[in-house]
């Protein structure tokens, strides 16, 4: 139905006339505002923000991510081709665990970028931890914005019935001051603090007081969590800058140190070590695969416990079972590669508690059947001379042995334990096996082993990640300290300088200025 000319004229005038908002003033006039009120603008902005957060990934964003993935694949392919052609890469890739703190330490920040997925809803479901882990500037800005917005919303509420209840607010600024005073502390300086016996101020003041208590409690919890989180506590857990590679009794070992700087050290500290590397075979490649590294000290079957009050050695044996040692034939970016491999006496030996039964030597079986043999004392024979069994020196004690005695004839513990077995009688091996057991790795084998590890670490981007976990005795919070080692952090054939000394009074002294220092082969340890 067509409208009349008068209706069209009125509609056009209404469109051209600015809308008036607000309540009547004392003079009976209306306050004219050219733009919509603040509450409508904030509501519109909130709706647009919520719509953008709930919006799924657009085709343009998806196309941008696909382009990024394709760029990464092209860069990987170009690197593989350059490496296959024999071109030298200028520098190693960035670490997966950054060492960006002072004194060669790491703050535990993972160099991992996460993209894709509907992560917004997941983060909003765990909103408290999302807010706690925000950067400090964003967190402070968000806290200020929430507090100011809450005060402003209640100020507008007071302004809506200020004339009816005699609150005498001239503008929004006065209402904001009154709302801020109510939020911070209730101590009004007005003559009529009953506000004309209106029920509206009573209701809104109660709501605002409750909201203020909730916000202050939430802010206190966030600040407390930020101040007591384990990220700052881990800064006093010290790892050695270098990891030394040593040959002891014909076997290769990777060793680094860890200690606590504070007098109040971590309780029930444990350590885990992982090797993060790429996997490659004839079917393709898998990047950044984590492998657990078995430790000889502290032993994994005992929980990997550490006494953080003193510098502790962390020892990993580089044998055929180690994820750091390549197989005799392995596939690199240039194609299949091979090397001589480890000597048979360096190969992984079975350990108790891992599906292997204890191996009994002749002396064990002899002692088992000793009760069935008649004693020679009963027939008047002189008592035989008793043989003195000495304890076998452990691998950890030989870690600090002089370099000239590193190739000792004493073999490693077969059971994988340290300093727990008695030394068997020294009997010469069979002729066919004498050279096999007596000969350790030569200098040429050491050089070949180092070259093989260099090529393997470079091709697979191997990185060693050490994680120490313990409980802080003051806050009872779990603290995790992380550190990483790459091939450039290895000190080949070095040894750690002594940093623990005995004072004249008999007390222990730990000198952390010597904690990171290593000694070259032949250098005097000074002890």
Image (cartoon, rainbow, N blue to C red):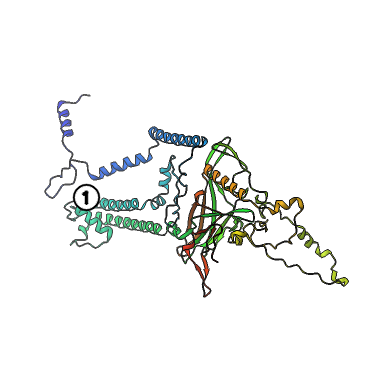
Q: Which quadrant of the view contains residue 270?
A: bottom right
The residue lying at 43 percent from left, 43 percent from top is 119
Residue farthest to the top, as pictured: 2
The furthest residue to the left: 27
From the top left corner, tell me how far across and down residue 343 is, in percent.
66, 48
Taking the image as shown, residue 418 lies to the left or right of residue 513, namely: right
Q: In the image, is residue 70 above or below residue 519?
A: above
x 28%, y 41%: residue = 44
Quadrant of image for the N terminus:
top left
- Direction from residue 351 to residue 369 in the image, left or right: right
Q: Secondary structure at mark 1?
A: helix
The tally of labels here is 1
Q: Position of residue 94 (x, y in %)?
A: 45, 45
What residue is shown at x 32% (from left), y 41% (from top)? 47
Q: Quadrant of the C terminus?
A: bottom right
Q: Please tell me which residue lies in front, 83 or 10.
A: 83
Q: Residues within 10 Å of mark 1 (few under 14, many from 20)?
A: some
Q: Which residue matches tag 1?
A: 160
Check the image and name the residue furthest to the right.
379
Q: Position of residue 72 (x, y in %)?
A: 45, 37
The image quadrant of residue 365 is bottom right
Q: Nearer the viewer, residue 450 or 101?
A: 450
48 to the left or right of 412: left
Q: Nearer the viewer, residue 310 or 436?
A: 436
Residue 490, x across and y down, in percent: 52, 52
- Placement of 44 over or under 504, stated as above or below: above
Residue 515 vs 442, above or below: the answer is below
């Amino acid at each position: 139905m067509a409208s009349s000319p008068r209706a069209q004229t009125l509609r056009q005038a209404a469109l051209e006339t600015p809308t008036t908002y607000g309540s009547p003033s004392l003079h009976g006039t209306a306050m004219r505002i050219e733009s919509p009120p603040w509450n409508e603008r904030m509501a519109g902005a909130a709706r647009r923000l919520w719509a953008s957060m709930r919006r799924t990934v657009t085709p343009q964003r998806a196309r941008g991510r696909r382009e990024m993935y394709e760029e990464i694949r092209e860069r990987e392919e170009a690197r593989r081709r350059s490496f296959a052609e024999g071109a030298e890469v200028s520098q190693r890739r960035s670490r997966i665990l950054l060492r960006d703190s002072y004194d060669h330490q790491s703050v535990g920040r993972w160099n991992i970028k996460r993209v894709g997925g509907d992560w917004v809803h997941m983060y909003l479901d765990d909103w408290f931890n999302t807010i706690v882990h925000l950067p400090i500037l964003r967190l402070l800005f968000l806290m200020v914005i929430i507090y100011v917005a809450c005060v402003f919303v209640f100020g507008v509420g007071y302004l809506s019935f200020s004339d009816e209840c005699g609150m005498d607010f001239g503008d929004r600024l006065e209402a904001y001051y009154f709302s801020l005073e109510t939020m911070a502390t209730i101590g009004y300086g007005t003559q009529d603090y009953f506000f004309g016996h209106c029920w509206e101020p009573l209701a809104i003041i109660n709501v605002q007081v409750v909201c203020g208590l909730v916000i202050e409690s939430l802010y206190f919890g966030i600040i407390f969590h930020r101040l007591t989180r384990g990220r700052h506590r881990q800064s006093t857990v010290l790892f050695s800058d270098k990891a030394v590679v040593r040959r002891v009794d014909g076997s290769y070992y990777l060793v680094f140190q860890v200690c606590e700087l504070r007098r109040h050290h971590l309780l029930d500290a444990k350590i885990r070590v992982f090797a993060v590397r790429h996997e490659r075979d004839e079917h393709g490649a898998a990047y950044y695969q984590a492998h657990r590294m078995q430790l000889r000290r502290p032993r994994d079957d005992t929980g990997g416990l550490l006494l953080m009050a003193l510098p502790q050695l962390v020892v990993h044996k580089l044998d055929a079972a180690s994820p750091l040692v390549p197989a005799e034939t392995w596939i690199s970016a240039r194609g299949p590669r091979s090397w001589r491999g480890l000597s048979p006496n360096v190969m992984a030996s079975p350990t108790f508690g891992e599906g292997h039964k204890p191996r009994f030597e002749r002396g064990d079986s002899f002692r088992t059947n000793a009760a069935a043999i008649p004693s020679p004392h009963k027939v008047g024979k002189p008592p035989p001379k008793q043989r003195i069994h000495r304890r076998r020196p452990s691998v950890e004690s030989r870690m600090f042995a002089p370099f000239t005695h590193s190739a000792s004839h004493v073999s490693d513990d077969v059971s994988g334990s340290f300093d727990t077995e008695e030394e068997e009688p020294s009997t010469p091996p069979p002729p066919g096996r004498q050279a096999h057991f007596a000969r350790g790795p030569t200098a040429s084998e050491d050089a070949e082993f180092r070259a093989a590890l260099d090529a393997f670490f470079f091709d697979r981007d191997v990185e060693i990640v050490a994680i120490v976990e313990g409980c802080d005795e003051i806050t009872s919070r779990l603290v995790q300290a992380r550190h990483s080692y790459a091939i450039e952090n290895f000190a080949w054939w070095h040894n750690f300088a002594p940093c623990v000394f005995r004072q004249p009074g008999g007390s222990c002294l730990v000198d952390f200025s010597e904690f990171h220092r290593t000694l070259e082969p032949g250098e005097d340890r000074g002890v």
